């Protein structure tokens, strides 16, 4: 049996994204864009700060 999700997942590199921009189309306000910065603490990968600009 072929698992399309598994094949798709293994075909690309996955890694942390430190900076991301997300855009949403709001019906009344138009396009809303948010920039995110993810700040990882070096001693603990489970704790991080996410800043919305």
Image (cartoon, rainbow, N blue to C red):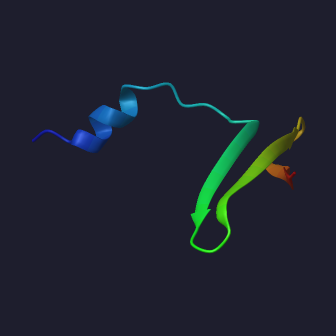
From the top left corner, tell me how far across and down residue 26 is, in percent: 60, 68
Residue at 87 percent of width and 51 percent of height: 53
User: Residue at 68% across / 69% down in the picture?
Assistant: 29
Residue found 69% across the figure and 36% down from its top: 17
Judge whether residue 45 can be spotted in this image.
no
- Outermost residue on the left side: it is 1
**Camera-nearest residue between 25 and 52:** 25
Horizontal and vertical percent position of residue 9: 38, 36
- In the image, is residue 31 above or below residue 35? below
Image x and y of residue 16, in percent: 67, 35
> Residue 23 location in percent, x, y?
63, 52
25 in relation to 34, above or below: below
Q: Eyeballing the image, is 10 above or below 41?
A: above
Q: Nearer the viewer, residue 48 or 51?
A: 51
Residue drawn at point x = 30 percent, y = 39 percent = 6
Q: Compared with residue 30, is residue 5 higher up or lower down, i.e. above or below? A: above
Residue 2 image-quadrant placement: top left
Write down the quadrant of residue 43 in the picture. top right
Quadrant occupied by the N terminus: top left
Q: Is residue 26 left or right of residue 43?
A: left
Give the side of residue 42 with respect to residue 1, left or right.
right
Q: Is residue 48 visible?
A: yes
């Amino acid at each position: 049996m072929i698992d399309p999700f598994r094949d798709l997942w293994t075909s690309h590199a996955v890694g942390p994204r430190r900076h991301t921009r997300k855009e949403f189309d709001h019906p009344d306000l138009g396009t809303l864009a948010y920039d995110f910065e993810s700040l990882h603490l070096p001693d603990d990968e489970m704790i991080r700060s996410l800043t919305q600009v």
